Amino acid sequence: MPKKPDKNQFHKFKKYSLFATTKINNMLNIVLFGPPGAGKGTQSAKLIDKYSLVHLSTGDIFRANIKNQTELGNLAKSFIDKGQLVPDQVTISMLESEVNKYPQAAGFIFDGFPRTQAQAQALDTLLVSKQTGINLMLALEVEEEELRKRLLIRGKDSGRADDQDPAVIQKRIDVYNAETSPVKDYYQQQGKYRGINGIGEIETIFGLLCAEIDKA
Ligand code: ADP
């Protein structure tokens, strides 16, 4: 009988492979990944504190622009209200100008970006131009039923319009599954993907994330 592949084999290999996740040009750059409602915002806040990183949340930046009624905000709103992604070109150029605001950063937590393969490639190109790169993608794994529950609760607490309509929530989950989830493969191929159980106490999940960063 052929031996079943050991699930951990790839991880063991990665640890000693060329894809070592030490700081790149003295920066620690992390993609915090996961479906809407996975807890990326909550964990980002704790991670930036502990590791002195800059938090770049594309969702937060869009919402700030919507609040200030900028041209970018008005454009983004038309997509966000429907649960669709803001077009890549718009999102990528916004993200690039945000990164350029922090030339002295010790590193970044990218929260909600990249959400498409094109965004992942653009991020790599940008970071390479700064002689750095992504160290790790940490992915919070939470099943759909739990996401729906969390988002509706968040909608009540925060007043966020896109969290109040079950049809918009479902659309975002569907877009995640179709367009965003494949971005995992991009990082997996580079040996940078780490899946983390996103259900449990906030502190427990934070501990799991930190353990991956500290191992890297
Ligand atoms: P959540 O993770 O709960 O969906 P976010 O705050 O990350 O919330 O994003 C809110 C909305 O902003 C998304 O549904 C999407 O319309 C838009 N958005 C955020 N980041 C991106 C991105 N990287 N590419 C395209 N659209 C984005």
Image (cartoon, rainbow, N blue to C red):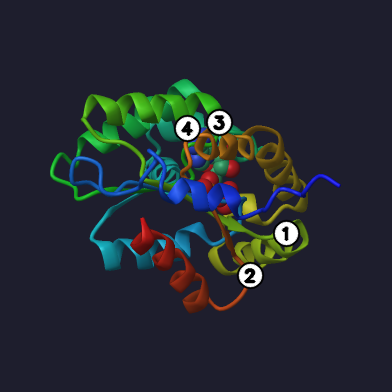
Is residue 193 something one can see in this rendering?
no
Q: Residue furthest front?
A: 1
Image position of 154 with respect to 61: above or below: below
Secondary element type, mark 4 = helix
Please give the residue where the numbered disc 2 appears in the rendered image: 199
Closer to us: 216 or 100? 216
Q: Please, what is the three-letter code of the amino acid marked with disc 3?
A: Thr
Secondary element type, mark 2 = loop
Q: CA distance from mark 2 to mark 4?
A: 34 Å
CB of mark 3 near ligand 1 (< 8 Å): yes
Q: Residue furthest left?
A: 104
Asked whether, in this view, residue 139 is left or right of residue 1, the answer is left
**Percent x, y for residue 14?**
47, 46
Please give the residue where the numbered disc 3 appears in the rendered image: 116
Q: Please, what is the three-letter code of the amino acid marked with disc 2?
A: Ile
Please give the residue where the numbered disc 1 appears in the rendered image: 143
